[in-house]
Image: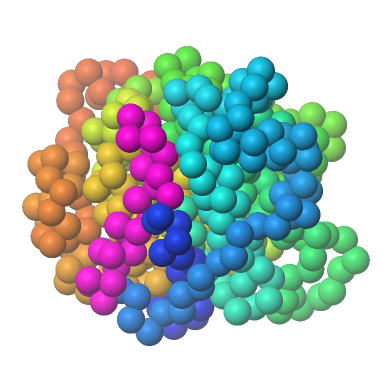
């Protein structure tokens, strides 16, 4: 497949999203999406590509997953009225601080992901990317991990309610959605929402909960009831590097996507697996993310991509820009995509030398500890999940 010839890609973003910000001391920077768009515009990677300016998600949409009490409490807290109920719901913590415009920002970021889903459902896009999305920790009545509104859950709910255009056969059942999360943190909010359903498969590659928030996402978490086998977790050891990451990805994600045969893939591209991210301990370059996107594209499915985490702002913006270039089929054809002198290797934020990072060689300790840990995870996941899918 040549993505540049077959894909209709839409970049979903609004300058209004850049008007909001978490408190300065918070590691989450809402400016990342705008920075990624600026890079793309400067490099001509938005020329001839459609862009969509979203509207905020409506209250009716938000209440498909979140409770009315939670949303009311969130609105009151954003206006300066944080009570004990708000604290119990997670507001006012270091990772979910209260700030002016908190509700409006969350609703608009969610609206962007819903807009991406609608573009795919209508056939107007085969790829839709909202870098401001990916709030995979939020629950129906609690905020967690910088996440207030779970746009991923709401988008998957919207996608599974409708049939997809262009199918060779029409079916009365809902479509299958695969949520593939490569953010460094486990997608506990999404997993919890769909753990007993088989129409949404969740595959999460993340740093192990033994060393990183939220402390979940182990190999034995595989779903319940009708959803047994449809929650797949790949916890990775500290220091995981590109080669070992892709070994696990090819061994687990690719055969499961093939056998599940989803009608759309929702992809969370959190860039906090990159070496040097201040909140995590993996050692990837953005070339690994590019390889993941290439693998996902090879299935020829519509892709709804969302940003997720990433707390080194410049590296995150570069990584998203590279992911977009790959999704549009531009990365292999434009010399500016080639390996340059910027990126995590030299701790430089100068993307003019190329969006791709330099290769990072693992050190002796990584070579000693990471391969056996990865092999053990692969075998555990295969033992727990693969037989349930005839693999």
Report the colour scheme. rainbow
Report whether residue 215 is seen. yes
Q: Which is nearer the eye, 317 or 322? A: 317
Q: Is residue 94 left or right of residue 382?
A: left
Q: Which is nearer the eye, 383 or 316? A: 316
Q: Residue furthest top?
A: 210
What residue do we see at 60% from left, 52% from top?
107
Answer above or below: position of 309 versus 173: above
Q: Is residue 337 left or right of residue 1?
A: left
Answer above or below: position of 253 versus 52: above
What residue do we see at 66% from left, 68% from top?
118
Residue range highlighted in magenta:
20-44
Answer above or below: position of 228 versus 246: above
x, y percent for residue 305: 51, 57
What residue do we see at 26% from left, 64% from top?
39
Q: Which is nearer the eye, 32 or 319? A: 32
* Residue 37 among those drawn in magenta: yes
Q: Which is nearer the eye, 226 or 68? A: 68
x, y percent for residue 191: 66, 35
x, y percent for residue 31: 35, 51
């Amino acid at each position: 497949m040549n993505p540049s010839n077959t894909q209709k890609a839409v970049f979903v973003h609004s300058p209004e999203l850049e008007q909001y910000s978490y408190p300065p001391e918070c590691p989450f920077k809402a400016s990342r999406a705008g920075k990624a768009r600026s890079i793309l515009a400067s490099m001509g990677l938005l020329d001839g590509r459609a862009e969509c300016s979203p509207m905020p998600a409506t209250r009716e949409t938000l209440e498909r997953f979140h409770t009315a009490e939670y949303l009311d409490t969130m609105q009151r807290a954003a206006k300066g009225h944080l009570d004990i109920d708000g604290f119990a719901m997670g507001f006012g913590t270091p990772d979910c601080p209260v700030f002016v415009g908190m509700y409006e920002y969350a609703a608009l970021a969610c609206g962007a992901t819903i807009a991406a889903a609608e573009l795919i459902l209508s056939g107007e896009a085969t790829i839709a990317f909202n870098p401001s999305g990916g709030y995979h920790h939020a629950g129906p009545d609690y905020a967690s991990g910088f996440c207030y509104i779970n746009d991923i859950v709401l988008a998957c709910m919207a996608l599974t309610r409708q049939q997809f255009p262009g199918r060779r056969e029409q079916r009365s059942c809902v479509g299958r959605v695969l949520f593939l999360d490569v953010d460094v943190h486990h997608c506990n909010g999404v997993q919890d929402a769909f753990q007993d359903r088989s129409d949404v498969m969740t595959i999460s590659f993340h740093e192990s909960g033994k060393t990183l928030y939220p402390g979940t996402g182990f190999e034995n978490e595989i779903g319940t009831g009708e959803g047994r086998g449809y929650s797949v977790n790949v916890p990775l050891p500290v220091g995981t590097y590109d080669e070992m990451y892709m070994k696990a990805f090819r061994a687990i994600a690719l055969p499961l996507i093939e056998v599940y045969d989803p009608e759309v893939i929702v992809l969370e591209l959190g860039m906090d697996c990159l070496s040097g991210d201040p909140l995590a301990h993996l050692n990837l370059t953005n070339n690994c993310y590019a390889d993941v996107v290439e693998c996902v594209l090879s299935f020829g499915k519509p892709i709804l991509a969302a940003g997720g985490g990433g707390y080194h702002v410049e590296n995150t913006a570069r990584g998203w820009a590279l992911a977009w270039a790959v999704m549009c089929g531009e990365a292999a054809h434009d010399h500016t995509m080639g390996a340059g002198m910027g990126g995590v290797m030299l701790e430089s934020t100068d993307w003019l030398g190329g969006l791709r990072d330099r290769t990072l060689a693992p050190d002796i300790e990584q070579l000693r500890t990471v391969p056996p840990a990865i092999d053990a995870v692969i075998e555990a996941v295969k033992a727990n999940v693969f037989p349930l899918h005839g693999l």
